Amino acid sequence: MTQTRLRRSGLRALALLAVGIMLFSSGLLADQGQSAVGKEAMIAAAHPLAARAALEVLREGGNAVDAAVTAAFVIGVVEPDASGLGGGGGMVIYLQDEAASHYINYYVQASERINELQFTRPADNRSAKAVLVPGTVAGLTLALERFGTLPLARVLEPAIRFAEEGFAVDQTLAMIILDNVPLLQQYESTASLYLPDGFPLAEGDTLRQPDLGRTLRAIASHGPKGFYGGSVAEAIVSGTVEHGGVLTLEDMKRYEAQLVEPLVGTYRGYEILSAAIPQSGVSIVEGLNMLENTDLASTGHFSTSGQGFHIVAEMMRRVYADRVAFLGDPRFHPIPVRGLTSKEYAAERFRDIDQERADPPDYRKTSTGNPLPYEEESLVPVEEGEGDGGHTTHLTVVDGRGNAVSLTQTLGTFFGSGLIVEGVLLNCGMTNFSTRYEVNLPEPGKRPRSSIAPTIILKDGKVSATVGSPGATRIVAVVLELIVNLLDFSMGAVEANDAPRFLCQKNDDVLSLEGRVSLEVQADLRRRGHTLQVYGDYDLFFGGAQIIVVDHATGTLHGSADPRRGGVAAGY
Protein backbone atom coordinates (compact mmCIF):
# COMPACT_ATOMS: atom_id res chain seq x y z
CA MET A 1 0.00 0.00 0.00
CA THR A 2 2.78 2.44 0.92
CA GLN A 3 4.74 1.81 -2.29
CA THR A 4 1.55 2.25 -4.34
CA ARG A 5 0.82 5.59 -2.69
CA LEU A 6 4.39 6.78 -3.22
CA ARG A 7 4.26 5.72 -6.86
CA ARG A 8 0.99 7.57 -7.36
CA SER A 9 2.40 10.68 -5.71
CA GLY A 10 5.52 10.59 -7.88
CA LEU A 11 3.60 10.16 -11.13
CA ARG A 12 1.18 12.89 -10.14
CA ALA A 13 4.11 15.20 -9.42
CA LEU A 14 5.52 14.55 -12.90
CA ALA A 15 2.15 15.31 -14.43
CA LEU A 16 1.91 18.53 -12.45
CA LEU A 17 5.41 19.51 -13.55
CA ALA A 18 4.42 19.04 -17.18
CA VAL A 19 1.33 21.17 -16.70
CA GLY A 20 3.42 23.77 -14.90
CA ILE A 21 5.85 24.00 -17.81
CA MET A 22 2.94 24.46 -20.21
CA LEU A 23 1.35 27.18 -18.10
CA PHE A 24 4.64 28.96 -17.47
CA SER A 25 5.48 29.04 -21.16
CA SER A 26 2.05 30.50 -21.90
CA GLY A 27 2.63 33.28 -19.39
CA LEU A 28 -0.34 32.33 -17.25
CA LEU A 29 1.66 31.45 -14.17
CA ALA A 30 4.84 33.07 -12.98
CA ASP A 31 5.60 30.26 -10.57
CA GLN A 32 3.82 26.98 -9.96
CA GLY A 33 4.47 23.50 -8.66
CA GLN A 34 4.17 21.83 -5.29
CA SER A 35 5.64 25.09 -3.99
CA ALA A 36 5.54 28.58 -5.40
CA VAL A 37 6.56 32.16 -4.60
CA GLY A 38 4.71 35.27 -5.76
CA LYS A 39 4.44 38.98 -5.14
CA GLU A 40 0.84 39.69 -6.15
CA ALA A 41 -1.29 36.62 -5.56
CA MET A 42 -1.12 32.96 -4.57
CA ILE A 43 -3.39 29.93 -4.67
CA ALA A 44 -2.80 26.41 -3.40
CA ALA A 45 -5.24 23.75 -4.59
CA ALA A 46 -5.48 20.05 -5.31
CA HIS A 47 -5.43 20.36 -9.12
CA PRO A 48 -3.49 22.60 -11.58
CA LEU A 49 -6.57 23.40 -13.66
CA ALA A 50 -8.24 24.91 -10.59
CA ALA A 51 -5.13 26.95 -9.87
CA ARG A 52 -4.93 28.19 -13.45
CA ALA A 53 -8.57 29.25 -13.48
CA ALA A 54 -8.20 31.10 -10.19
CA LEU A 55 -5.10 33.00 -11.28
CA GLU A 56 -6.76 34.02 -14.54
CA VAL A 57 -9.53 35.58 -12.44
CA LEU A 58 -7.00 37.34 -10.21
CA ARG A 59 -5.14 38.74 -13.24
CA GLU A 60 -8.43 40.16 -14.50
CA GLY A 61 -8.76 42.14 -11.27
CA GLY A 62 -10.89 39.73 -9.29
CA ASN A 63 -10.29 39.36 -5.58
CA ALA A 64 -9.52 36.35 -3.40
CA VAL A 65 -13.20 35.44 -3.08
CA ASP A 66 -13.72 35.51 -6.86
CA ALA A 67 -10.67 33.28 -7.28
CA ALA A 68 -11.61 30.86 -4.52
CA VAL A 69 -15.17 30.42 -5.82
CA THR A 70 -13.83 29.89 -9.34
CA ALA A 71 -11.38 27.27 -8.12
CA ALA A 72 -14.02 25.57 -5.95
CA PHE A 73 -16.39 25.14 -8.90
CA VAL A 74 -13.54 23.87 -11.10
CA ILE A 75 -12.21 21.43 -8.50
CA GLY A 76 -15.66 19.86 -8.31
CA VAL A 77 -15.36 19.07 -12.02
CA VAL A 78 -11.73 17.96 -12.29
CA GLU A 79 -11.45 16.24 -8.89
CA PRO A 80 -14.97 14.74 -8.85
CA ASP A 81 -14.17 12.08 -6.29
CA ALA A 82 -13.66 14.70 -3.56
CA SER A 83 -16.21 17.50 -3.92
CA GLY A 84 -18.71 19.14 -6.23
CA LEU A 85 -22.20 20.55 -6.58
CA GLY A 86 -23.68 17.60 -4.70
CA GLY A 87 -21.65 18.15 -1.53
CA GLY A 88 -20.99 20.88 0.99
CA GLY A 89 -18.30 22.64 2.94
CA GLY A 90 -17.21 25.85 4.62
CA MET A 91 -14.95 28.82 4.05
CA VAL A 92 -13.22 31.44 6.16
CA ILE A 93 -12.93 34.85 4.50
CA TYR A 94 -10.74 37.75 5.63
CA LEU A 95 -11.14 41.18 4.00
CA GLN A 96 -8.10 43.32 4.67
CA ASP A 97 -9.53 46.77 3.90
CA GLU A 98 -12.43 46.20 6.27
CA ALA A 99 -10.41 44.20 8.79
CA ALA A 100 -13.45 41.89 8.77
CA SER A 101 -13.71 38.12 8.93
CA HIS A 102 -16.60 35.88 7.93
CA TYR A 103 -17.45 32.20 7.87
CA ILE A 104 -19.84 30.60 5.42
CA ASN A 105 -21.21 27.22 6.50
CA TYR A 106 -22.56 25.44 3.44
CA TYR A 107 -22.42 21.93 4.80
CA VAL A 108 -25.07 19.36 3.86
CA GLN A 109 -28.38 19.34 5.74
CA ALA A 110 -30.91 16.67 6.69
CA SER A 111 -34.24 16.42 4.90
CA GLU A 112 -37.43 17.34 6.72
CA ARG A 113 -38.39 13.69 6.12
CA ILE A 114 -35.23 12.29 7.70
CA ASN A 115 -37.18 10.49 10.44
CA GLU A 116 -38.86 8.40 7.74
CA LEU A 117 -35.54 7.14 6.40
CA GLN A 118 -34.77 3.48 6.97
CA PHE A 119 -30.99 3.84 7.19
CA THR A 120 -28.75 0.93 8.15
CA ARG A 121 -25.03 1.22 8.79
CA PRO A 122 -22.79 0.27 7.13
CA ALA A 123 -24.94 -1.17 4.34
CA ASP A 124 -26.44 2.20 3.33
CA ASN A 125 -23.41 4.41 3.96
CA ARG A 126 -22.61 4.78 0.28
CA SER A 127 -26.02 4.85 -1.31
CA ALA A 128 -28.86 7.22 -2.16
CA LYS A 129 -30.18 6.74 1.36
CA ALA A 130 -27.14 8.64 2.65
CA VAL A 131 -27.84 11.77 0.56
CA LEU A 132 -28.51 15.01 2.44
CA VAL A 133 -29.44 18.38 0.91
CA PRO A 134 -26.33 19.69 -0.94
CA GLY A 135 -24.93 23.05 0.11
CA THR A 136 -22.07 23.83 -2.28
CA VAL A 137 -24.03 25.91 -4.77
CA ALA A 138 -25.66 28.00 -2.04
CA GLY A 139 -22.38 28.61 -0.24
CA LEU A 140 -20.26 29.52 -3.24
CA THR A 141 -22.87 31.80 -4.77
CA LEU A 142 -23.44 33.53 -1.41
CA ALA A 143 -19.72 34.18 -1.05
CA LEU A 144 -19.55 35.63 -4.55
CA GLU A 145 -22.63 37.80 -4.10
CA ARG A 146 -21.57 39.25 -0.74
CA PHE A 147 -17.80 39.50 -1.08
CA GLY A 148 -16.82 38.93 -4.72
CA THR A 149 -16.59 41.40 -7.58
CA LEU A 150 -17.23 39.33 -10.72
CA PRO A 151 -20.48 38.03 -12.26
CA LEU A 152 -21.42 34.42 -11.53
CA ALA A 153 -21.46 33.59 -15.24
CA ARG A 154 -17.80 34.65 -15.56
CA VAL A 155 -16.74 32.71 -12.49
CA LEU A 156 -18.42 29.55 -13.80
CA GLU A 157 -16.87 29.70 -17.28
CA PRO A 158 -13.86 27.46 -16.52
CA ALA A 159 -15.92 24.81 -14.72
CA ILE A 160 -18.41 24.70 -17.60
CA ARG A 161 -15.59 24.40 -20.12
CA PHE A 162 -13.88 21.51 -18.32
CA ALA A 163 -17.22 19.73 -17.85
CA GLU A 164 -18.26 20.03 -21.51
CA GLU A 165 -14.93 19.81 -23.31
CA GLY A 166 -13.40 17.43 -20.83
CA PHE A 167 -9.97 17.10 -19.27
CA ALA A 168 -7.31 14.42 -19.08
CA VAL A 169 -7.70 11.99 -16.19
CA ASP A 170 -4.54 12.08 -14.09
CA GLN A 171 -2.87 9.27 -12.20
CA THR A 172 -4.55 10.05 -8.89
CA LEU A 173 -8.10 10.13 -10.26
CA ALA A 174 -7.48 7.00 -12.35
CA MET A 175 -6.34 5.06 -9.30
CA ILE A 176 -9.25 6.30 -7.16
CA ILE A 177 -11.69 5.22 -9.88
CA LEU A 178 -10.02 1.81 -10.00
CA ASP A 179 -10.19 1.49 -6.20
CA ASN A 180 -13.93 2.31 -6.18
CA VAL A 181 -15.28 0.23 -9.07
CA PRO A 182 -17.92 -1.60 -6.95
CA LEU A 183 -19.35 1.73 -5.77
CA LEU A 184 -19.33 3.22 -9.26
CA GLN A 185 -21.11 0.15 -10.67
CA GLN A 186 -24.21 0.38 -8.48
CA TYR A 187 -25.92 3.22 -10.42
CA GLU A 188 -26.09 3.28 -14.22
CA SER A 189 -25.71 7.05 -14.43
CA THR A 190 -22.40 6.80 -12.60
CA ALA A 191 -21.11 3.64 -14.27
CA SER A 192 -21.68 5.09 -17.75
CA LEU A 193 -19.46 8.05 -16.88
CA TYR A 194 -16.55 6.44 -15.03
CA LEU A 195 -16.77 2.89 -16.38
CA PRO A 196 -17.51 3.30 -20.10
CA ASP A 197 -18.01 -0.06 -21.80
CA GLY A 198 -17.50 -1.62 -18.39
CA PHE A 199 -13.88 -0.51 -18.01
CA PRO A 200 -12.65 2.16 -15.59
CA LEU A 201 -11.22 5.35 -17.04
CA ALA A 202 -7.45 5.24 -17.13
CA GLU A 203 -4.77 7.89 -16.87
CA GLY A 204 -4.77 10.04 -20.00
CA ASP A 205 -8.40 9.30 -20.92
CA THR A 206 -10.63 12.33 -21.41
CA LEU A 207 -13.47 12.70 -18.90
CA ARG A 208 -16.39 14.67 -20.33
CA GLN A 209 -19.43 15.48 -18.18
CA PRO A 210 -22.04 17.08 -20.48
CA ASP A 211 -24.90 16.66 -18.00
CA LEU A 212 -22.86 18.46 -15.34
CA GLY A 213 -22.10 21.16 -17.89
CA ARG A 214 -25.83 21.74 -18.44
CA THR A 215 -26.43 21.99 -14.70
CA LEU A 216 -23.58 24.48 -14.35
CA ARG A 217 -25.09 26.52 -17.20
CA ALA A 218 -28.44 26.54 -15.39
CA ILE A 219 -26.69 27.97 -12.33
CA ALA A 220 -24.86 30.54 -14.46
CA SER A 221 -28.18 31.68 -15.95
CA HIS A 222 -30.44 31.53 -12.90
CA GLY A 223 -28.11 31.61 -9.90
CA PRO A 224 -28.76 29.17 -7.05
CA LYS A 225 -32.40 28.85 -8.18
CA GLY A 226 -31.02 27.02 -11.21
CA PHE A 227 -29.95 24.27 -8.81
CA TYR A 228 -32.40 24.40 -5.92
CA GLY A 229 -35.45 24.84 -8.12
CA GLY A 230 -36.74 23.94 -11.57
CA SER A 231 -35.86 20.82 -13.49
CA VAL A 232 -32.49 20.24 -11.80
CA ALA A 233 -33.99 20.13 -8.31
CA GLU A 234 -36.89 17.98 -9.51
CA ALA A 235 -34.48 15.48 -11.04
CA ILE A 236 -32.24 15.35 -7.93
CA VAL A 237 -35.24 14.75 -5.68
CA SER A 238 -36.86 12.12 -7.89
CA GLY A 239 -33.56 10.36 -8.57
CA THR A 240 -32.71 10.19 -4.87
CA VAL A 241 -36.19 9.01 -3.84
CA GLU A 242 -36.22 6.39 -6.60
CA HIS A 243 -33.22 4.75 -4.95
CA GLY A 244 -34.45 4.95 -1.36
CA GLY A 245 -33.58 8.50 -0.26
CA VAL A 246 -35.96 11.04 1.26
CA LEU A 247 -35.16 14.45 -0.26
CA THR A 248 -38.08 16.76 -1.14
CA LEU A 249 -38.44 19.82 -3.35
CA GLU A 250 -39.17 21.81 -0.21
CA ASP A 251 -35.83 20.65 1.27
CA MET A 252 -34.04 22.00 -1.79
CA LYS A 253 -35.99 25.26 -1.83
CA ARG A 254 -35.41 25.98 1.87
CA TYR A 255 -31.68 25.33 1.96
CA GLU A 256 -29.62 28.40 2.86
CA ALA A 257 -25.92 28.79 3.46
CA GLN A 258 -25.17 30.31 6.86
CA LEU A 259 -23.10 33.50 7.03
CA VAL A 260 -21.70 33.73 10.57
CA GLU A 261 -18.59 34.84 12.41
CA PRO A 262 -15.68 32.41 12.34
CA LEU A 263 -14.45 30.72 15.50
CA VAL A 264 -11.77 33.08 16.87
CA GLY A 265 -8.86 32.27 19.16
CA THR A 266 -5.33 33.40 19.88
CA TYR A 267 -2.03 31.53 19.96
CA ARG A 268 1.35 32.94 20.93
CA GLY A 269 0.43 36.46 19.81
CA TYR A 270 -1.38 35.42 16.61
CA GLU A 271 -5.12 35.54 15.95
CA ILE A 272 -6.68 32.28 14.72
CA LEU A 273 -9.79 32.38 12.50
CA SER A 274 -11.31 28.96 11.92
CA ALA A 275 -14.52 27.12 11.10
CA ALA A 276 -17.61 27.87 13.18
CA ILE A 277 -19.64 25.08 14.80
CA PRO A 278 -20.66 22.40 13.95
CA GLN A 279 -17.44 22.35 11.96
CA SER A 280 -14.24 21.85 13.94
CA GLY A 281 -12.59 25.24 14.45
CA VAL A 282 -13.50 24.93 18.13
CA SER A 283 -11.17 21.92 18.33
CA ILE A 284 -8.33 23.84 16.70
CA VAL A 285 -8.64 26.68 19.22
CA GLU A 286 -8.97 24.31 22.18
CA GLY A 287 -5.86 22.39 21.16
CA LEU A 288 -3.77 25.52 20.66
CA ASN A 289 -4.94 26.91 24.00
CA MET A 290 -3.73 23.73 25.68
CA LEU A 291 -0.32 23.94 24.00
CA GLU A 292 0.19 27.50 25.24
CA ASN A 293 0.79 25.91 28.64
CA THR A 294 4.12 24.48 27.47
CA ASP A 295 7.16 25.70 25.56
CA LEU A 296 7.19 23.39 22.55
CA ALA A 297 10.07 25.21 20.88
CA SER A 298 12.41 24.27 23.74
CA THR A 299 10.99 20.75 24.08
CA GLY A 300 11.66 19.97 20.41
CA HIS A 301 9.67 19.12 17.32
CA PHE A 302 7.63 15.92 17.56
CA SER A 303 9.53 14.36 14.65
CA THR A 304 12.76 14.41 16.67
CA SER A 305 11.65 14.67 20.31
CA GLY A 306 9.75 11.95 22.08
CA GLN A 307 8.79 14.39 24.83
CA GLY A 308 7.41 16.93 22.35
CA PHE A 309 5.56 14.20 20.43
CA HIS A 310 4.04 12.81 23.63
CA ILE A 311 2.73 16.19 24.79
CA VAL A 312 1.09 16.99 21.46
CA ALA A 313 -0.39 13.49 21.21
CA GLU A 314 -1.89 13.66 24.69
CA MET A 315 -3.33 17.09 23.92
CA MET A 316 -4.78 15.79 20.71
CA ARG A 317 -6.74 12.88 22.12
CA ARG A 318 -8.30 15.12 24.79
CA VAL A 319 -9.39 17.54 22.08
CA TYR A 320 -10.95 14.68 20.13
CA ALA A 321 -12.71 13.40 23.26
CA ASP A 322 -14.28 16.83 23.82
CA ARG A 323 -15.17 17.16 20.14
CA VAL A 324 -17.29 14.02 20.01
CA ALA A 325 -18.85 14.80 23.38
CA PHE A 326 -19.96 18.36 22.79
CA LEU A 327 -19.97 19.37 19.13
CA GLY A 328 -23.18 19.49 17.09
CA ASP A 329 -25.54 21.84 15.25
CA PRO A 330 -26.07 24.86 17.56
CA ARG A 331 -29.56 25.46 16.15
CA PHE A 332 -30.69 22.24 17.82
CA HIS A 333 -28.59 21.98 20.98
CA PRO A 334 -26.64 24.45 23.13
CA ILE A 335 -22.92 23.95 22.50
CA PRO A 336 -20.37 25.02 25.17
CA VAL A 337 -18.24 27.08 22.80
CA ARG A 338 -17.14 29.59 25.44
CA GLY A 339 -16.02 26.82 27.73
CA LEU A 340 -14.27 24.74 25.08
CA THR A 341 -12.32 27.77 23.82
CA SER A 342 -11.51 29.29 27.21
CA LYS A 343 -7.86 29.60 28.22
CA GLU A 344 -8.74 28.56 31.77
CA TYR A 345 -10.45 25.38 30.62
CA ALA A 346 -7.47 24.60 28.39
CA ALA A 347 -5.12 24.97 31.34
CA GLU A 348 -7.27 22.56 33.32
CA ARG A 349 -7.22 20.04 30.47
CA PHE A 350 -3.46 20.41 30.07
CA ARG A 351 -2.90 19.69 33.77
CA ASP A 352 -4.65 16.36 33.17
CA ILE A 353 -1.76 15.26 30.92
CA ASP A 354 0.86 12.97 32.41
CA GLN A 355 4.07 14.45 31.02
CA GLU A 356 5.85 11.09 30.98
CA ARG A 357 3.31 8.36 30.26
CA ALA A 358 0.27 7.72 28.06
CA ASP A 359 -2.61 8.18 30.47
CA PRO A 360 -4.77 6.21 30.23
CA PRO A 361 -2.84 3.73 28.04
CA ASP A 362 -6.12 2.73 26.36
CA TYR A 363 -6.92 5.70 24.11
CA ARG A 364 -10.61 4.83 24.09
CA LYS A 365 -10.74 5.51 27.82
CA THR A 366 -9.59 9.11 27.42
CA SER A 367 -11.84 11.17 29.63
CA THR A 368 -14.10 13.93 28.41
CA GLY A 369 -13.46 17.29 30.05
CA ASN A 370 -16.01 19.52 31.73
CA PRO A 371 -16.24 22.97 30.09
CA LEU A 372 -19.61 23.61 31.73
CA PRO A 373 -18.30 25.72 34.64
CA TYR A 374 -17.14 28.19 31.99
CA GLU A 375 -20.62 28.39 30.47
CA GLU A 376 -23.69 30.37 31.42
CA GLU A 377 -26.02 27.45 30.71
CA SER A 378 -26.14 23.91 32.06
CA LEU A 379 -25.26 21.35 29.41
CA VAL A 380 -25.01 17.57 29.46
CA PRO A 381 -21.88 15.99 27.92
CA VAL A 382 -22.16 12.80 25.90
CA GLU A 383 -19.64 10.45 24.36
CA GLU A 384 -19.57 8.52 21.13
CA GLY A 385 -17.44 7.29 18.26
CA GLU A 386 -17.58 8.20 14.60
CA GLY A 387 -16.28 6.80 11.34
CA ASP A 388 -12.87 7.81 10.04
CA GLY A 389 -13.58 7.53 6.34
CA GLY A 390 -13.89 10.55 4.13
CA HIS A 391 -12.59 12.34 1.12
CA THR A 392 -12.47 16.08 0.88
CA THR A 393 -10.58 18.90 -0.81
CA HIS A 394 -9.04 22.13 0.43
CA LEU A 395 -7.91 25.26 -1.38
CA THR A 396 -6.70 28.64 -0.26
CA VAL A 397 -6.13 32.03 -1.90
CA VAL A 398 -4.41 35.28 -0.92
CA ASP A 399 -4.68 38.27 -3.26
CA GLY A 400 -2.58 41.39 -3.71
CA ARG A 401 -4.82 43.46 -1.47
CA GLY A 402 -4.29 41.17 1.50
CA ASN A 403 -7.65 39.41 1.30
CA ALA A 404 -7.66 35.68 1.99
CA VAL A 405 -9.93 32.66 1.71
CA SER A 406 -9.46 29.23 3.28
CA LEU A 407 -12.03 26.75 1.91
CA THR A 408 -12.74 23.06 2.53
CA GLN A 409 -15.50 21.11 0.79
CA THR A 410 -16.47 17.47 0.53
CA LEU A 411 -18.79 14.73 -0.70
CA GLY A 412 -18.24 12.75 2.50
CA THR A 413 -16.23 9.83 1.10
CA PHE A 414 -14.68 8.98 -2.27
CA PHE A 415 -17.48 9.67 -4.80
CA GLY A 416 -19.97 10.30 -1.96
CA SER A 417 -23.13 8.22 -2.32
CA GLY A 418 -22.09 7.01 -5.77
CA LEU A 419 -25.30 8.38 -7.31
CA ILE A 420 -25.19 10.88 -10.18
CA VAL A 421 -28.28 12.88 -11.15
CA GLU A 422 -28.17 15.65 -13.80
CA GLY A 423 -24.40 15.21 -13.80
CA VAL A 424 -24.24 15.94 -10.07
CA LEU A 425 -22.49 13.37 -7.88
CA LEU A 426 -24.42 13.41 -4.61
CA ASN A 427 -22.99 13.32 -1.09
CA CYS A 428 -23.23 10.69 1.65
CA GLY A 429 -23.63 13.19 4.48
CA MET A 430 -25.88 10.91 6.52
CA THR A 431 -22.74 9.09 7.66
CA ASN A 432 -21.61 12.20 9.58
CA PHE A 433 -24.50 11.90 12.00
CA SER A 434 -24.25 9.85 15.17
CA THR A 435 -26.16 6.68 15.90
CA ARG A 436 -26.85 7.02 19.63
CA TYR A 437 -26.23 10.42 21.17
CA GLU A 438 -28.49 13.44 20.97
CA VAL A 439 -26.03 16.23 20.21
CA ASN A 440 -25.33 14.79 16.75
CA LEU A 441 -28.33 12.54 16.07
CA PRO A 442 -30.10 13.13 12.73
CA GLU A 443 -33.05 15.51 12.99
CA PRO A 444 -35.11 17.28 10.31
CA GLY A 445 -33.21 20.28 8.96
CA LYS A 446 -30.11 19.55 11.05
CA ARG A 447 -26.52 19.73 9.82
CA PRO A 448 -24.17 16.99 11.01
CA ARG A 449 -20.91 17.61 12.79
CA SER A 450 -17.95 17.87 10.45
CA SER A 451 -14.18 17.65 10.81
CA ILE A 452 -13.46 20.43 8.33
CA ALA A 453 -11.38 23.27 9.78
CA PRO A 454 -10.29 25.85 7.18
CA THR A 455 -8.14 28.37 9.05
CA ILE A 456 -6.58 31.81 8.56
CA ILE A 457 -3.83 33.13 10.86
CA LEU A 458 -3.51 36.89 11.46
CA LYS A 459 -0.68 38.94 12.96
CA ASP A 460 -1.33 42.59 13.78
CA GLY A 461 -4.47 42.58 11.65
CA LYS A 462 -2.78 41.18 8.53
CA VAL A 463 -2.87 37.68 7.06
CA SER A 464 0.16 35.72 8.17
CA ALA A 465 -0.83 32.29 6.86
CA THR A 466 -3.73 30.19 5.65
CA VAL A 467 -3.98 26.45 6.28
CA GLY A 468 -6.40 23.60 5.78
CA SER A 469 -6.60 19.98 4.75
CA PRO A 470 -8.92 17.16 3.73
CA GLY A 471 -8.77 13.86 5.58
CA ALA A 472 -11.95 13.20 7.60
CA THR A 473 -11.20 13.01 11.33
CA ARG A 474 -7.48 13.49 10.63
CA ILE A 475 -8.18 17.11 9.63
CA VAL A 476 -8.10 18.43 13.20
CA ALA A 477 -4.75 16.75 13.87
CA VAL A 478 -3.22 17.92 10.59
CA VAL A 479 -4.30 21.55 11.00
CA LEU A 480 -3.02 21.65 14.59
CA GLU A 481 0.33 20.21 13.52
CA LEU A 482 0.65 22.67 10.63
CA ILE A 483 0.01 25.65 12.91
CA VAL A 484 2.53 24.35 15.44
CA ASN A 485 5.07 23.91 12.64
CA LEU A 486 4.55 27.48 11.46
CA LEU A 487 4.29 29.31 14.77
CA ASP A 488 6.26 27.26 17.31
CA PHE A 489 9.06 26.09 15.04
CA SER A 490 9.15 29.01 12.56
CA MET A 491 8.93 26.71 9.54
CA GLY A 492 8.17 28.04 6.10
CA ALA A 493 5.18 26.85 4.09
CA VAL A 494 7.05 24.02 2.36
CA GLU A 495 8.87 22.79 5.46
CA ALA A 496 5.65 22.86 7.53
CA ASN A 497 3.76 20.88 4.89
CA ASP A 498 6.60 18.42 4.45
CA ALA A 499 7.09 17.61 8.16
CA PRO A 500 6.01 14.13 9.37
CA ARG A 501 2.43 13.85 10.66
CA PHE A 502 0.57 11.75 13.18
CA LEU A 503 -2.87 11.15 14.65
CA CYS A 504 -3.85 10.30 18.21
CA GLN A 505 -7.56 10.29 18.99
CA LYS A 506 -9.87 8.83 21.58
CA ASN A 507 -11.68 6.43 19.29
CA ASP A 508 -8.59 4.62 18.02
CA ASP A 509 -6.55 1.79 19.49
CA VAL A 510 -3.27 3.07 18.03
CA LEU A 511 -1.23 6.22 17.55
CA SER A 512 -0.80 6.56 13.76
CA LEU A 513 2.33 8.20 12.41
CA GLU A 514 4.41 8.54 9.26
CA GLY A 515 7.54 6.44 8.95
CA ARG A 516 9.87 9.46 8.78
CA VAL A 517 9.51 9.99 12.52
CA SER A 518 12.88 8.82 13.83
CA LEU A 519 13.24 5.31 15.20
CA GLU A 520 14.53 6.81 18.46
CA VAL A 521 11.31 8.81 18.88
CA GLN A 522 9.21 5.75 18.04
CA ALA A 523 11.06 3.73 20.70
CA ASP A 524 10.58 6.55 23.20
CA LEU A 525 6.84 6.64 22.51
CA ARG A 526 6.54 2.90 23.06
CA ARG A 527 8.37 3.25 26.39
CA ARG A 528 5.81 5.87 27.34
CA GLY A 529 3.00 3.36 26.74
CA HIS A 530 1.86 4.34 23.25
CA THR A 531 0.85 1.72 20.70
CA LEU A 532 2.10 2.73 17.26
CA GLN A 533 0.86 2.14 13.73
CA VAL A 534 3.50 3.29 11.26
CA TYR A 535 2.41 4.44 7.81
CA GLY A 536 4.45 5.36 4.75
CA ASP A 537 6.89 8.24 4.74
CA TYR A 538 4.39 10.50 2.91
CA ASP A 539 0.99 8.93 3.29
CA LEU A 540 -2.33 10.16 1.88
CA PHE A 541 -3.95 8.95 5.10
CA PHE A 542 -2.69 12.20 6.66
CA GLY A 543 -4.52 14.53 4.31
CA GLY A 544 -3.60 16.85 1.47
CA ALA A 545 -2.93 20.24 3.03
CA GLN A 546 -2.66 23.57 1.24
CA ILE A 547 -0.69 26.41 2.87
CA ILE A 548 0.07 30.01 2.02
CA VAL A 549 2.49 32.03 4.18
CA VAL A 550 2.76 35.80 3.79
CA ASP A 551 6.18 37.37 4.40
CA HIS A 552 5.33 41.02 5.03
CA ALA A 553 9.02 41.94 5.42
CA THR A 554 9.77 41.03 1.79
CA GLY A 555 6.28 41.36 0.33
CA THR A 556 6.27 37.77 -0.90
CA LEU A 557 3.68 35.00 -0.80
CA HIS A 558 4.85 31.43 -0.30
CA GLY A 559 2.51 28.62 -1.34
CA SER A 560 2.78 24.91 -0.67
CA ALA A 561 0.63 22.04 -1.91
CA ASP A 562 0.88 18.81 0.04
CA PRO A 563 3.31 16.28 -1.49
CA ARG A 564 1.06 13.52 -0.13
CA ARG A 565 -1.70 14.48 -2.53
CA GLY A 566 0.19 16.06 -5.39
CA GLY A 567 -1.67 19.36 -5.48
CA VAL A 568 -0.31 22.59 -6.90
CA ALA A 569 0.62 26.02 -5.58
CA ALA A 570 0.66 28.84 -8.13
CA GLY A 571 1.40 32.53 -7.89
CA TYR A 572 2.68 35.57 -9.73
Image (cartoon, rainbow, N blue to C red):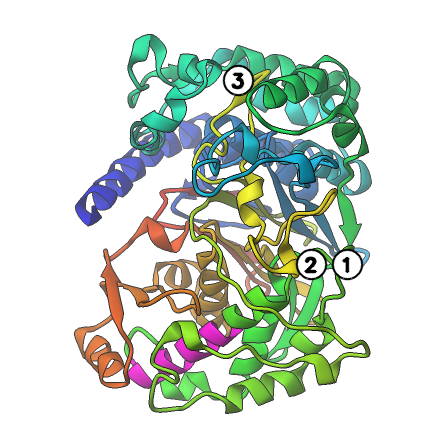
Tell me the tag on residue 163: 3
Instruction: Give the crowd class for mark 2: few <14, some 14-19, many >=20 residues within 10 Å.
Output: many
Residue at 41 percent across and 63 percent down: it is 496
User: Does label 2 or label 3 sit earlier along the sequence?
Assistant: 3
Name the N-terminal-most of marks 2 and 1.
Answer: 1
| Residue at image coords 29%, 28% | 178
Point out the stretch of residues depicted in magenta.
305-319
Please name the amino acid that badge 3 sits on: Ala
Question: Between 307 and 240, which is closer to the camera in this rendering?
Answer: 240
Q: Nearer the viewer, residue 133 or 385?
A: 385
Q: Residue 319's x, y, as percent?
A: 53, 72
Of helix, strand and loop, which mostly describes the magenta segment?
Answer: helix
**Separation of residues labelled 2 and 1 (CA atoms):** 7 Å
Question: Which residue corresponds to mark 1?
Answer: 261
Give yes or no for contact between labels 2 and 1 (Cβ–Cβ under 8 Å).
Answer: yes
Q: Are marks 2 and 3 in contact (CB under 8 Å)?
A: no
Instruction: Give the side of residue 22 with respect to residue 91, left or right.
Output: left
**Residue 443: image x %, image y %?**
70, 47
Q: Residue at x 43, y 65 (%)?
A: 507
Asked if residue 35 lies left or right of residue 137, the reply is: left
Q: Which residue position is annotated with label 2?
A: 276
Between circles 2 and 1, the one closer to the viewer is 2
**Is residue 192 covered in magenta?**
no
**Residue at image point 65% right, 75% down:** 340
Note whether 6 is above or below 158 in the view shown: below
Q: Secondary structure at mark 2?
A: loop
Hey, what amino acid is under mark 2?
Answer: Ala
In primary-sequence order, the first of circles 3 and 1 is: 3
How many neighbours does mark 1 have within 10 angstroms: few (below 14), some (14-19), or many (20 or more)? some
